[in-house]
Image (cartoon, rainbow, N blue to C red):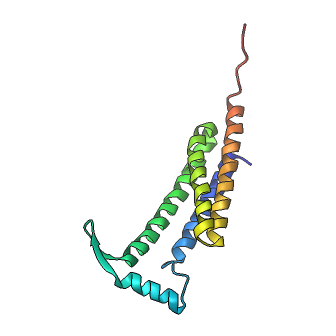
Amino acid sequence: MKAFHSLRIAAVVTLLYCAGHTAGMPWTPYTDAEGTSVLDAMKSHHFAAQGFKGAYWDIYFGFGIVISLYMLVLAVALWQVAALAKAEPARVRPVVATFLIAFIINTALAWKYFFVVPVVMSGVIAMCLGAAFVQAGREGRLQHPPRPISL
């Protein structure tokens, strides 16, 4: 498999991750009495800070939307990087490394704070990015083999 393919798989899985996150809106898995009371408190406690007037719920909900947007942008960026990897695989390695580090951290944070599905999704994306990083290095060496030393 080539870096292009691994990056396209990572893009599709990221898009699925985005869709799953967005479909989970309003991101409140707890519907028991205690969970509902926490949500009600988040919605009812209003405050003003730095020009913002709203409730903790507004911030929580807004961050959820922002995360969905960023995941959508990541999926598009990975798709575009895959296209670049076809032509010049070695040149995309720094970008792939950046995304790889981000998704490794995402996986660790999901493991600590969230559920199985985000752990699996971000872990699969990280594995695809790791494979793409290695494959891009190999493909880059094949495109530009080392020159023999002339004496």
The residue at 64%/58% (across/down) is 125
Decide if residue 17 is on the left or right side of residue 58. Answer: right
- Image quadrant of residue 49? bottom left
- Is residue 97 visible in the rendered structure shown here? yes
Where residue 89 sits in the image (x, y, percent)? Answer: 63, 40
Observer-nearest of 87 and 69? 69
Residue lying furthest left = 51
Tell how many labels: 0
Residue lying furthest bottom = 33
- Image quadrant of residue 104? bottom right
Observer-nearest of 111 and 127? 111
Decide if residue 2 is on the left or right side of residue 35. Answer: right
- Image quadrant of residue 124? bottom right
- Is residue 16 visible in the rendered structure shown here? no
Residue lying furthest top = 151
Observer-nearest of 78 and 134? 134
Where residue 143 sits in the image (x, y, percent)? Answer: 68, 32
Where residue 107 sits in the image (x, y, percent)? Answer: 62, 61
Q: Quadrant of the C terminus?
A: top right
Q: In this rendering, is residue 91 above or below 54? A: above
The residue at 66%/45% (across/down) is 133
Where residue 54 sits in the image (x, y, percent)? Answer: 31, 76
